[in-house]
Every structure is written in C-alpha cells, then in structure tokens.
Amino acid sequence: VEQSPPQSPGPGKAGDAPNRRSGHVRGARVLSPPGRRARLSSPGPSSSSEAREELRRRLRGLIERSRVMIFSKSYCPHSTRVKELFSSLGVECNVLELDQVDDGAKVQEVLSEITNQKTVPNVFVNKVHVGGCDQTFQAYQSGLLQKLLQEDSAYDYDLIIVGGGSGGLSCAKEAAILGKKVMVLDFVVPSPQGTSWGLGGTCVNVGCIPKKLMHQAALLGQALCDSRKFGWEYNQQVKHNWETMTKAIQNHISSLNWGYRLSLREKAVAYVNSYGEFVEHHKIKATNKKGQETYYTAAQFVIATGERPRYLGIQGDKEYCITSDDLFSLPYCPGKTLVVGASYVALECAGFLAGFGLDVTVMVRSILLRGFDQEMAEKVGSYMEQHGVKFLRKFIPVMIQQLEKGSPGKLKVLAKSTEGTETIEGVYNTVLLAIGRDSCTRKMGLEKIGVKINEKSGKIPVNDVEQTSVPYVYAVGDVSEGKPELTPVAIQSGKLLARRLFGASLEKIYHTLFWPLEWTVAGRENNTCYAKIICNKLDHDRVIGFHILGPNAGEVTQGFVAAMKCGLTKQLLDDTIGIHPTCGEVFTTLEITKSSGLDITQKGCG
Amino acid sequence: LEDHLTGQRDYDLLVIGGGSGGLACAKEAAQLGRKVAVVDYVEPSPQGTRWGLGGTCVNVGCIPKKLMHQAALLGGLIQDAPHYGWEVAQPVPHDWRKMAEAVQNHVKSLNWGHRVQLQDRKVKYFNIKASFVDEHTVCGVAKGGKEILLSADHIIIATGGRPRYPTHIEGALEYGITSDDIFWLKESPGKTLVVGASYVALECAGFLTGIGLDTTVMIRSIPLRGFDQQMSSMVIEHMASHGTQFLRGCAPSRVRRLPDGHLQVTWEDCTTGKEDTGTFDTVLWAIGRVPDTRSLNLEKAGVDTSPDTQKILVDSREGTSVPHIYAIGDVVEGRPELTPTAIMAGRLLVQRLFGGSSDLMDYDNVPTTVFTPLEYGCVGLSEEEAVARHGQEHVEVYHAHYKPLEFTVAGRDASQCYVKMVCLREPPQLVLGLHFLGPNAGEVTQGFALGIKCGASYAQVMRTVGIHPTCSEEVVKLRISKRSGLDPTVTGC
C-alpha cells in the first residue's frame, strides 16, 4: 500500500510539477488495485475549464468504481468516524484525503457541484450520494446504508420512475439513452367523476394540450365574428358543437398517448400501467387495474407523480362538481357553468367556455392569478368581463346540491361572502373547481422509506440536484417543492437529472475523444457503436491521443467543455435568472447532433 | 435669398416626404424643440390612385397588406372552425367591397391620426410637391399650382419609392395595376395575374388566393431574391399547394384588352422560347420599386445619386454629398426597404442633429417577416450568405419540421412548417440567422431578433425554457443539424 506524503494544497513548487498532474488521485490509490493508476493519469489539461472537466470526470470514475467512496480530510474527526463505521462493518473503502492532494480545494468545489454538499466527509455508497457524517450514521441506523451496500446488480432496474408525465417520461428516455435499465410506472387514478386517461400525464391529457386546443376553438369563434368585417359572408347564426370539438381533441390526445408508448418501447423502457407504492427500501409494489400486485426493485427512483386538482371539502363537491381532469373529455356541453377559483386554470377554462357562447361565472375568493403581476391580472379579468364572463368576487361556495340529473344536470350552489355574513344562491348546469392542485405523494408509501414531504402542501422538498431526503430517491416536476409547475421545466429537469445520475455515459461522450483509454475502462455495452463513430471523427480531425487538434473534433469537445465551464456557463448564469445551475449537460445533445447522432431522433420530444 | 444671406431660414429642419421615416424625423425634431416642416405629396398612380399622409407603409404597403392577409387567414380559419365544433355551412363567399371599404376606412383614420400628431407637435405640414431650388431652399407646388419657397438649415429627404412598371411591354402601363392600386380597388380584381417574385408579389398573390380569387404568379427567375432560398422555395411550395398557380421561368411580352373587357396576356417561356397566352381580369406588376427622386431636382442642391438605381448615396451618418442634407428610408442606396428601419434611422439621425447624440443606425440583423399565407420570419443571415461569409465548414445549421398544435385538430397540412437556425460551427456557436416558416412568424421572430442582437449563441438558445404549447418553442428545441443528415421532423409533443 502506497501512502502519499502530506502536501500543502495550492500551487506547489516548480519541482512538484511532474507529479502534480496525477497528484490529486494519490489518495485514492490507498485501496485501489495497482492497475487503476494507468487510467487515472492523463496528459495535463490545457485550460482551466478542461482541467475542471477532467477532474469532474475522474471524480465520477472514482465514485462509479468504488463500492464505498469517501472524500475526507485526514485531520477531520467526522471523516474519521465515518471511516471507522465502515471499517467496523468490514467494508473496504476508497478514501481520498483532500488535504493531502494538491487540488483538494478544486475537488471539493467540483464535489459540491455534483452533490450540493460543500463539506467533508462526502460519502458515496454504490454510486449513491449518502451525504456527510450525520447522514451516513442516520442511514446506518435506518438500515438504508446496509441496503445500499448490497450489490447494484441485485436490483431489477437501474431506475424506476413513478409517474409517466412530461418530467417522468423525459427522465426515463434520457436514462435509457444513457444505457440504463429503466421502468416507468404510470397509473391514472380515476377522478371522482370517473374520468381517466392514457400515458403522458397532465400536460398531454388534461392540461396544456387540450386547454390550448379549446382555447383555439374559442379564438376561432372570435375569428368567425371578425371574418364578417373582413368581407366573408354568411348570415346564419354559428353554433358551437361541444361533442364535435371534444371528439377531435380526444382523438389527437389518443395519438399522443400512443406516441409516448411507442417511444418508450423504442428505447426499451419498461412501461407498466400500475400504481406504485414503496414497501421497503429500494422496493416498490405495483398494483394494476385488476388489483394484481407485482414487486420491483431498483437502485434509484424518481418520483414524478405530479398533481391533481383540489376539492373544496364541502357538501356535494366530489359528487357533483367537475375539475379540469373531467372538462376536456366531458361527453356533453357543460352549459351554464360556475368556475370556482382564480388560478390560471380557472381563468383559461372560463375564457374558452365563454368563447363557445356559454353563460360563465367565475367565483373568486380573493385575487386573480396569484403570483402574477397584479396589474396584468386585473386587466385579464376586465377583458374577460367585457367579453361576457361574470365575476363573483369575495365569495366561496359552501354547499352544492343537485336539483336535476342530466347531461348536464342542474346544480344549486350556495356561497358565502368572505367579508361578511352575506350568502348567495345560484343555479348552474356545471360547477368546475379550479382552486388549486395537490401533489400525489400521500398514498405511495414514501413514509415507509423515509422520503420527507411538506406536510402542508404534500410536496417533496429536494435539493439543487433534485434529491429527496432519501439519497437514492429523486423528484421532478410539479411534485417537487419550490419549482415552477410548467411542462418544459419538468422535461428539462427530468432530462438533466438522468444525465447527472448516469453521467458516466455523458462523460463518455467527452471520453470518446479519448476513445482508446475509455474503451478499456468502459465495459458498458451500449456505447460500442457510438464510440466507433467518434473514433472515425478523431481520425478525420487529426486527433492523436488526448489532444484535440482538428477543427471538427475540436468543435465538438470544445463546445462541451466550453459550455460546462467557460465563459458560456458563466454568461448563462449572468444572463439568465433561475436556470438550473448544472447546465453543462445540455451540450450532450448538441454533441450527438454533430456526430452521426444515432440517438437524437429517438429522443423525440422535449 | 436675402434670408439665406442673413442666415435667417424658415425652419431648423425640413423633411421632404411624409412617410414613416420622414414623420419620425419631424416628430423627433419637434420634440427636441426645433422648428420643423414636412412636405408631402402623392403623385397619383398611372391608374389614378391617390392617398393621404403617411407614405407607402400606411397607405399602400404594410398596413393594408397585412389587413388583407388577415382576411385571407380568416378564410382559412373558417375552414378550420367545423373541426373545432363550429357549425358553419361551407363554402363561405367573400365580398371584396366590404373588405376593401373596411381596410380603406382604417387607413384613412391613420392618415388623420398622422395629421393630428403633426399638429400636436407644432410641425408645419404642406401638401405640396417639392423640388430643390438650391441647397437650403425647396420650392413646393400645391395642387392648384400655387408655389411656395421653404428654406431650412437641415433637410432630410425621405421620399421613398414607387412601384416599377415594365418599360418594354405593350399595354403594361395602360392595363396593369401595381400595389399602389390594389388596396384601393372598389371592386374585386377577379382573376389576377401577378407578375414578379418579390415579397410584394407573393404577399398579394397569397391574399388574393386566400379570399378565393383565381390567382397566378409569373416568375422569371428566382423567388424572394436575397432571402434564404430554401425558405423561399418552401413558401412557394406552400402557396402552390394552397391554390396559387405559378408560371415559372416565364416573362410577359404584351397585355391587350379583349372586346369583352378581359385582359389577354402573352408571355414567353424563357427556356423554350415558346409563346403562350392567358386571359385575366387584372394584371398586377410587382417587379420592384424605383426611388422617388426624379422630380426633386437633386442636382440643384448637389445631392449625388447612384447612376444605376437613382437612389441617394449616403454615409453611415445618413449624410448625402451635401453636408446639411440627409436621406433615410427606401430612397437611400443600399438600405433595407423596411418601415421600422426608416423610423429608427430617422430618429437616430435627428438625435444626432439636435440631441447631441452620436449613435449610428446599425443595419445588421434587421428582422423582417414576409406575410405570405404561411408566414416567413427571418433575422440575420440566410444560409447561403452565412456559407459565403464563413465557409461551409464553419457553419452549422439546425432545423426542424414541426406541426403547430392548432393544425392537428383542423387536419391542416404542415409540410412547410419549418424552422432553421444558422450558427457558426465553432463553440459557442454564435447564432447568425434565424428563419421561421409558420403561423405568427412575425411575433415569433421579434423576440429572437433581440437575442441575436445581444449576441446569442446556440447554446444559450438551447438553454431557454420553452413556452408550451407554442410554435416558437420549436426554436429552443432545435437539436438536429443538417450536417448530421438526420430526419428533422419533430415527433411527439
């Protein structure tokens, strides 16, 4: 066993130079087989961003190849405790003492980018980031650590994603592209009115897509009025047929559902139409429509179950009211409608319903479009009012009664003022609740594995790398706390998450320029073909060894490297607020595009 | 002349031409406290069409064009409507008179608005035809023949241009109309032959087809010269698949009026040399525009023009060969013939003259949109131009065929809905040009024009979160490069 002498961090003396290149991995050799050294050394990086990328890649390598990897400092008592813990468990650890390598400070920086943890010890078990000393001991006490120490291959899947919406699907596809064995569990619990739908989540089935199509239908109504002024001649009163529209929209949605299933199949992602519920660490129970239960295990999980509309919790609401889950596939025209709520969902629905010529009233408890600029929100309200939507301000419904059954039937709504004792009554054909959405987190066994949720909102708090309180469980999309509830955000974060989790493959794209070396390290079958293509590119671009000389390969690699670290990332962070900080990954697709890009078409949407 | 000798001139600034650029100059200068006059005079078209204050854009350009384009779009929407549940009995006929009257009323209200604005700002307005007497003095002739002399310290020429008539085609002037007339026709033009391949030609042919008229476009060589040629040919493809007929590689040789009142057009196929004829109700020339400089007596002031184009030669500060005489807009050699550039150039010029500014107009990356039935928005370089400037090896083009969500339910064909971004190949892949073919192309392009102005790279565009579901989000989802040879058809959501 080699033991490296303690070195002062920071730039060394001139005499240190030859060693410094690989100096920062010395600590890792402590328990490494000798053969590893060759792979860890490489010619010196030519720029700081390349160096940083190189370092990131090496750290990844250490984490990937070590059953237990501890980034530590030799004098740190917490680090010592962690080392002693694993020692007492009889587990061999790979330790890198950051105070004993030249670039310890850099390593710590890059680690904090990967894990969002700035301190040591920083512990990884079977590629899963466990955390610091306290988290490691907590994991030990909860039994999680022992579970993590089990071999990876013992699991059925590398990744199981619960929820087949925009975020979940993008994450699944990306992970599959990166060569992982992935399963998606998606199950639509029917709404209280019995509505259910296919694969694709809220956006496709009961959100953006049908919403915009109905909005378009309403705009067409306006266009028809306009067209008379532009010389188009028809005299008849134009009526709107709800059934025709809904059928056309539902047909389009069915084709999208089908497209999603197809694209999962093409990428060899297992899709199971079952409800997922955690039963123990790394294990989930999938219950299908018939009530049959199957159990699956995975190394990592992503929760992307999204949200469903909230109910009022008053008499008659679940029995008689509908929500946006039901509206878009409603088999009959809703008729005179009361929309309860002032969210964008409420106003959008009220807007297009009025556009079809229906009598629409919006009941608002306090303000319109909370969170949006209020001047704009009020202008939206005034415009709607001018176009026939009635507003009942500062009222909340207290009871819904059915007066008549039918399609639609007749409902009596009793509401009371939020400011006084005044109550009002109204009769509507349909009452649409759009008062907010709740996360689907309560009935999926999260408490069994210790994933913390915000008790009030049901949302799952995650750190900057989408990780929940349980290290191997992640959350993306509407279900995660403090993130915008928007489809493209979910798609992007799902994709980026997959790349971070299985980033080894991503870095292989970078590595492919160093193909001969990577080939020895790899042993990951999915990249064979891919690597060859890049190898051809290297020839063409006159690249030898680890250095990139030719313009084409240079552009590919430089683009990636530049995007990761150079001016660009900085520029983006400077220019754009609120974009995810680990942004370099975005360039992988660009790289694939530039080479023969086999995978890119398969990525499809997003 | 005595005034000149004593240095007492009538105005600080005299603007010749009351179009978009000229009016912008006048208002800006008035705001800066200067004494300003605008002279404007519309020489009737050969067909006798005339109009009010505001120039080409307002009267016989952008504004009526886009309104008629909108009428045509509404025709398409009427066809979509039944798919969305609206029970409209098809087909729906179109009444030209009604549309034209509505469009003309709007234009007249704009004419009035411009006059009020000048009044409000105390800009003196003369409806006179101006020509230079000397370098500080202009003589104006009013409708009744009354003459007036105006002198100014600074003079801005902003007289714009007028449609060109072919010179060697029998009957062209007599029987043909131009864009100066089409928007002011009281009756439907009926079966129309549009001659030319400019955006004016294609836009007019597009809306005429869209409102249900039998329309043919005759193009001698390439469509939309100067625009990206791939996009241009897709524009043509879309028009052809939506009912516009094209006569490619043909040039007209004469126009005759038949006894029944129809126009018989004879043309020659330029490759075979064969002659052919067709009858039309209307022949619209859209073969280009000439600057309105001939009646200005520019030589009296010493203002130089290009011998080829008759356009006025200026430097980067919009200055002509005479120090205190400037020119902006379509009348200037080498400038894009676009309303917003004329306005901005005019404002900046006046700020330099009277506001102590030194900002020059930047004519790079000027965005524009062609309002053909499928709209084409572009900013920056065409693919050809990018390759010419940087070399094939250094240019990366990302592209996608997409389907607007609204098209799905309506069952519309989206074969030509296409977007491409022309970038430098070297990271960070500076965006050189953006080309968008699809609905609302103008609205889509505007924001990205800002981005390109700010030096956006492909990487930055890719990191922009899309707005879902829109057509413009296709721009931030461009992943397929032409070089990869992969199928750029967007599938899924």
Image (cartoon, coloured by chain):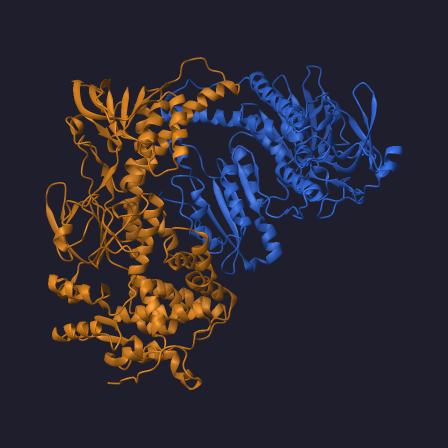
In this image, B279 relative to B444: left or right? right
Q: Residue furthest top?
A: A235
Return the residue nearer the eye: B435 or A466.
Answer: A466
Farthest residue, direction bottom: A15
Q: Position of residue A322 (x, y in %)?
A: 22, 28
> Is residue A335 visible in this depiction of the protein?
no
Q: Is B223 rendered above or below residue A427?
A: below
Q: Is residue A275 left or right of residue B152?
A: left
Residue positioned 61% across, 51% down in the render: B385
Q: Colour of chain B?
A: blue
- Above or below residue A129? Residue A249 is above
Query: Which percent across, then down, holds residue A11?
Result: 41, 78
Tell me the quarter of the image containing the N terminus of chain A: bottom left
Above/below status of A424 relative to A345 = above
**Residue at (32%, 29%) from the top-left corner?**
A349
Query: Residue A113 placed where, x, y %?
Result: 34, 63
Q: Colour of chain A?
A: orange
Camera-side residue: B439 or B347?
B347
The one of B362 and A418 positioned closer to us in this rendering: A418
